[in-house]
Image: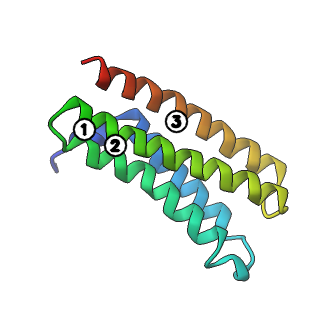
């Protein structure tokens, strides 16, 4: 069996990876003219969340780790902003909008708890 790195054990990383999959499935249905617009932006921002969490676990100091958790949170807010815009442009329906928002809120709460724990250690 392959070695499991510490970030792979984080529930928030697992949730953020699932968010990436949701974003990819939703943006697959976006019009082709959005390929270099919202599709690209949403995909890059969503991947950035889990990537920052993974990178942060490689840092030694709690302050550095918290910095990457903050970066992950910033990317999460970027995804939320773009999802709101996508919904208002009718690129996604209300069901997908609500489901993604629920995922984002769950990840936001976990990121805040992780960052707080890193800063208080």
Task: Name the element at disc 1.
Answer: helix
Give the quarter of the image for residue 59. top left
Name the residue rendered at 31%, 23% in the picture.
119
User: How busy is the neighbourhood of tag 1: few (under 14 within 10 Å), some, or many (20 plus)?
Assistant: some
Q: CA distance from mark 3 to mark 1?
A: 20 Å
Q: CA distance from mark 1 to mark 2?
A: 7 Å
The residue mark sitting in front, 2 or 3, is: 2
Residue at label 3? Answer: 107
- Write down the residue under mark 1: 64
Confirm or deny contact between disc 1 and disc 2 (CB under 8 A): yes
Circles 2 and 3 in contact, beta carbons < 8 Å: no
- Asked if residue 44 is positioned above or below residue 100 in the image, the reply reads below
> Which comes before the other along the chain, label 2 or label 3?
2
Disc 2 marks which residue? 68
Label 2's element? helix
Percent position (x, y) of residue 87? Answer: 79, 55
Q: Quadrant of residue 93?
A: bottom right
Q: Position of residue 100 (x, y in %)?
A: 66, 46
- 79 on left or right of 75: right
Give the vertical position of 89 relative to 109 (above or below).
below
């Amino acid at each position: 069996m392959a070695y499991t790195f510490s970030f792979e054990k984080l529930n928030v990383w697992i949730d953020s990876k699932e968010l990436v999959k949701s974003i990819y499935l939703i943006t697959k249905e976006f019009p082709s003219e959005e390929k270099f617009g919202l599709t690209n932006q949403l995909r890059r921002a969503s991947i950035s969340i889990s990537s920052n969490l993974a990178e942060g676990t490689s840092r030694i100091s709690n302050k550095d780790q918290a910095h990457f958790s903050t970066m992950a949170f910033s990317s999460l807010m970027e995804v939320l902003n773009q999802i709101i815009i996508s919904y208002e442009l009718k690129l996604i329906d209300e069901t997908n909008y609500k489901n993604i928002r629920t995922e984002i809120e769950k990840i936001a709460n976990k990121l805040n708890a992780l960052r707080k724990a890193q800063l208080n250690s």
